[in-house]
Image (cartoon, rainbow, N blue to C red):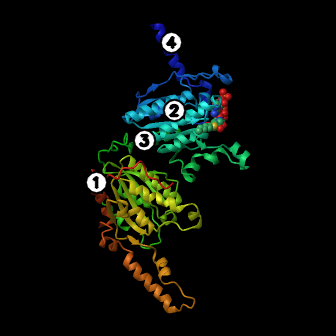
Amino acid sequence: MDERLQKLRQKRELALQGGGAKRIDAQHAQGKLTARERLAVLLDEGSFQELGALATHQNTDFGMADKKFPGDGVVTGFGKVNGRRVAVYAQDFTVLGGSFSQVQSNKICRLQDLAMESGIPLIGLNDSGGARVQEGVKSLAAYGEVFFRNVAASGVIPQLSLIMGPCAGGAVYSPALTDFVIMVDGSANMFLTGPEIIKAVTGEEVTSEDLGGAWVHNARSGVAHFESASDQEALELAKLVLSYLPQNNSQDPPSLTPYDDPYRAEAALDSIIPQDDNQPYDMRDVLDLVFDRESVLEVHSQFAPNAVTAFARLDGHSIGIVANQPSVLSGALDIDSSDKISRFISLCDMFNIPLVTFVDCPGYLPGVNQEYGGVIRHGAKIIYAYSQATVPKLCVVTRKAIGGSYVALSSKQMGNDIALAWPSAQIAVMGAEGASKLLNRKKPNQDLKETLSDTEFIAEYREKFFNPYNAADVGQIDEVIEPAETRLRLIQSLEVLRTKVQTGLPKKHGLFPV
Ligand code: HXC
């Protein structure tokens, strides 16, 4: 028995060594943790149960018979994050560059299946040179197995992808199919085709960092939702994101014991909207004052900054916030912000997180490039996502709700349960100057009298529509409130709506306007 135990212990010890001391040193030299060190940061102490630690590949081509490592470049298993069960895989770059083999796929797929059956979140730590070249099509098919399960798990369990090293070729599609992508600045990059192939095909010269670094995917492409400065920070961020999410779609997100006064009325909100309509303000200041102290966590903060999407807490409950950001592009909606907003609405809806929308939007951004880029179908995504979402939906119009932005973001017709407005709200079909131009089209021999009539028209238009009372009169706004009351009104409204049930017509699925 002793001998047999000894053998197991030796094998286990070998598995812990990954690709060996030299490669672990190289990993550390790049400022990266190893797969097992990352798991130690992520998981509650002593909670990790590994599966497949001794699995090895069976490939004998290209000298691979001599290159066997227990675990084959990925550590998989279950553990706990702040007491909650999670499934997790961590690719081990020290073993054959973390390259993706059939064995890796088998281990990850098994984890995906068990996570779906048990209804627990799946976290993937990615650090890999992509498909294992020596395995040919087997390695490609292996990716397909994982992608298929990513889709099956979508909307059932939360899926988080942390990119902590290279993620190239087909490897990018698994993270792209998950709910959140967190990239580590400096060490992570994601691209379908690398700099060398791009140079050969298009002649463009670009570095890996400029092609697919953390900044690129957070600020430009929108592929990533969070950027972190280090492995540790990325892992802590993953824990924080999880804290707003339920274990699966049949549960509500966990709520915290309330730690902030529900009756806290912030007088600062009463004067936050500038007197001048064209003056910006930072919507994040509004959110920080309304929601539980320090609870606002922006998602996609660098992408499409003319909109804000964030998790927060209200009286301890998890909330999804959608807001316009008047300090960027006056908060106008465009292609990227439509993508950002609609994705976030769908995400909150699938995980039973109520939505609160703060509206200050002059409408969709005019422009030839926007129209050529398909702002019509991108903008339609917001309407589709709100209309489809059955979670409680509240809105607060802080200032402008003009034209399409009123309909898409704050109208009862999108299924808004309770629509609140501040006295500074302006709800109209279009801006006053635009309306004047449209209705009082200038004639070639226009005289001074007609110009004055424009001014009168604008004054009358502003008087009539640039307030919330017209909309409240006709029942499109439920209540005009003092800004300082916003927190309490939202808490009370959500208390009522917590048990909301809404069902639609049976269908296979609709056609999301992608
Ligand atoms: C097999 C690989 C590998 C791979 C790296 N290695 N990538 N082995 N298949 N895909 C091995 C290396 O040979 C090396 O082994 C060890 O891992 C460490 O790699 P290095 O190159 O020494 O590390 P580094 O200098 O840090 O460079 C890392 C890297 C580079 C930038 C990721 O390895 C690289 O460019 N790899 C290929 C990336 C790529 O193009 N992947 C896409 C594959 S196509 P030794 O033993 O020599 O130390 C694809 C399509 C899938 O994924 C489509 C699915 C739908």
Residue bearing the label numbered 3: 158
Q: Which of marks 4 and 3 is nearer the N terminus?
A: 4
Q: Earlier in the sequence, mark 2 or mark 1?
A: 2
Residue bearing the label numbered 1: 497
Q: How many marks?
A: 4
Instruction: Tell me the amino acid under the disc marked 3.
Output: Pro
For discs 3 and 2, the disc positioned in front in the rendered view? 3
Q: Earlier in the sequence, mark 4 or mark 2?
A: 4
For discs 2 and 1, the disc positioned in front in the rendered view? 1
Q: Mark 3 Cα within 10 Å, few/some/many (few <14, many 20+)?
A: many
Instruction: Tell me the amino acid under the disc marked 2.
Output: Ala
Residue bearing the label numbered 2: 90
Q: Mark 2 Cα within 10 Å, few/some/many (few <14, many 20+)?
A: many
Q: Do the residues labelled 2 and 1 touch (CB within 8 Å)?
A: no
Q: Do the residues labelled 1 and 3 touch (CB within 8 Å)?
A: no
Vertical relation: 182 (above or below) 68:
below
Q: Which of marks 3 and 2 is nearer the N terminus?
A: 2
